[in-house]
Each structure stands twice: as structure tokens, then as C-alpha cells.
Image: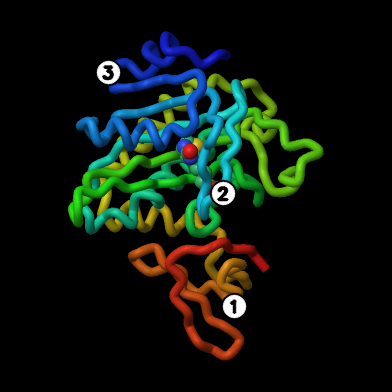
Amino acid sequence: MTLTRETLENVLSARPVRFYERTDSTNDLALEWLRQGAASGATVIADEQLKGRGRKGRTWHTPPGVALAVSVVLHPPVEALHQVSMLGALAIAELCEQLSPDAVAIKWPNDVQIAGRKVSGVLPETAWDGDKLAGVALGMGVNVRVDFTGTELEDKAVSLETVTGTTLDRALLLHDLLLRVDYWSARLGSAALFDAWKRRLNTIGQPITILDANIRGIAQAVDRQGALLVRDAEGRVQRIMAGDLALG
Ligand code: BTN
């Protein structure tokens, strides 16, 4: 179904929402809205992004009609800031579990995978007033019916409709996703959020490589900040705060 302002207003009712058929990046618009005083939960949605951003300066493609591109304004306490990306991954994982209960996992730090293929990515971006946290735009991108056939991502990425074999309504998916975001944002900073995120990681106990830091070893655990503890071949435990991870 086409995503329109009207369908979103019906489905998302009281939530402050800004919808764009096309924009550069929903994160930019959410950060701008945040600066203008947007409350927690204010949401920017686009059908198409022209300059969607991924982690580590990468591009995130959002062609029209096939994905969710959404950014939610949050005002977390600064000591819970590290949990915002966990929150995004967790909310998306729960959405995916409704559709495919057994195959969903989070690849550290916050890629949501179904049967080992990436279905979604999360990009929180912060706004600061000097050294005071003004807020966060929690950007989430979900592949709903992106066709990866014949692309370099064919073996690495997947869309929800490929998994379910059914047509999905993006407005209803957004409704369910935002319910999960609201639930967990009321619990930012909690052990419950950390535990729910950690339980879904498919990384612990596995041989892994941190590609951008050239570290190989066994992923031993995550700490409360979300950092990955990796035991290398010499037996040293390295603490990795962020990185690009490959299993194996
Ligand atoms: C990743 O690299 O895995 C993170 C991808 C995050 C993409 C989303 S789509 C909505 C929001 N707007 C952006 O420009 N990026 C995020």
C-alpha cells in the first residue's frame, strides 16, 4: 500500500508525525525538529531517501515504496545514551519476531538479521547544546520489499516480505514498530532493556573478526555499556565499543 500522510494519520493517531514522500535523510529532519523543540516520540517518516545515512559514513539506500525510513526524537538521560541504539535494534527485532518468530537475531552492535541476513539498520545521531545532551534522532531503516536479487547484497540482506511470503502494510508495520519504541524508551537505562538486547545477540561464543580494527578472536561477552569483549589468540581480552563485525 502507498504510504501517505493520510494513512499514517489514521494509523498513528495522536503521535506528532512529519511525513515526506522524498527527502535526503529523515535523521536530518528529526534533528532539525529536535532543535525546534520536538518532544520525545516525535517521528519523521519518508517514503524515499535520497541521501540516507548508514553507520560509519556509509550510504543507506531507501528507494520509493519498498522500505521503512523513520527517525524518532528521544530525550534520554545522558547516562542512558549508549542504550539508544540497543533500543532501536530491540524494537525492530521484536517487530520481526511477530512475523518470523524463530529466525530473528541481533548481530552486534545493532544490525537486525533474519536467518543471518540483514533486514534493518539503526543510526542514532545526537544533538548537543555545548556539553549538554539536547536529544537524539533514532534513525531506523527496514527492508520491507527491497529486491536484492543480482546485487552485491543478495547474500547479505533480506526483505520482510521475502521472509513472510506475504504483502505487508508499511503503515501497520510502522504502528507496531513505534509501539515497541515507546515501550522501550520508557525503560531507557534499565537492566530489562540491556537483557532483552543481549538475549538476542547471535555473536556471543562465536569466532569473530572486527574488520575495521583487524581484531580476531572469540566474542566472550558484552558489558553494560554494550561493548564487546573479545578474547584474541594470545588470550588477551579486548574491549570493542563499536565496529564492523564478521562472524567467523
Ligand atoms: C546501518 O548502517 O546499518 C544504519 C542504517 C540506518 C538507516 C536509517 S533510514 C532512516 C534514518 N535516516 C537515515 O539517513 N539513516 C537512518
Mark 2 residue element: loop
The reply, left or right, for residue 223 in relation to residue 69 is left
Q: Residue at x 63, y 63 (%)?
A: 246
Left or right for 36, reference 142: left
Decide: is 158 above or below 175: below
Label 2 within 8 A of ligand 1 by Cβ: yes
> What type is the residue that disc 2 sits on?
Arg
Q: Residue furthest bottom?
A: 234
Q: Determine which quarter of the picture holds residue 194.
A: bottom left
Dot label at residue 86: none
Q: Tag 1's secondary structure? A: strand
Q: Which residue is mark 1?
A: 217
Q: Quadrant of the N terminus?
A: top right
Task: State whether label 1 is within 8 Å of ligand 1.
Answer: no
Residue bearing the label numbered 3: 14
**Disc 3 secondary structure class:** loop
Whether residue 111 is visible to the viewer of this picture, yes or no, is: no
| Closer mark to the observer between disc 2 and disc 3 | 2
- How far from the left and from the top, in percent, is residue 3? 51, 16
- Crowding around mark 2 (Cα neighbors within 10 Å: few <14, some 14 to 19, many 20+) is few
Return the x and y of residue 101 as percentages of the image width and height: 56, 41
What is the CA distance from the residue labelled 2 to the residue labelled 1?
26 Å
Indicate the quadrant where residue 81 lies.
Answer: bottom left
Residue 58: numbered disc: 2
- Front residue (pair 169, 212): 212
Occupied quadrant, residue 183:
top left
- Tell me what residue is drawn at x 24 percent, y 47 percent: 76
The residue lying at 37 percent from left, 46 percent from top is 125
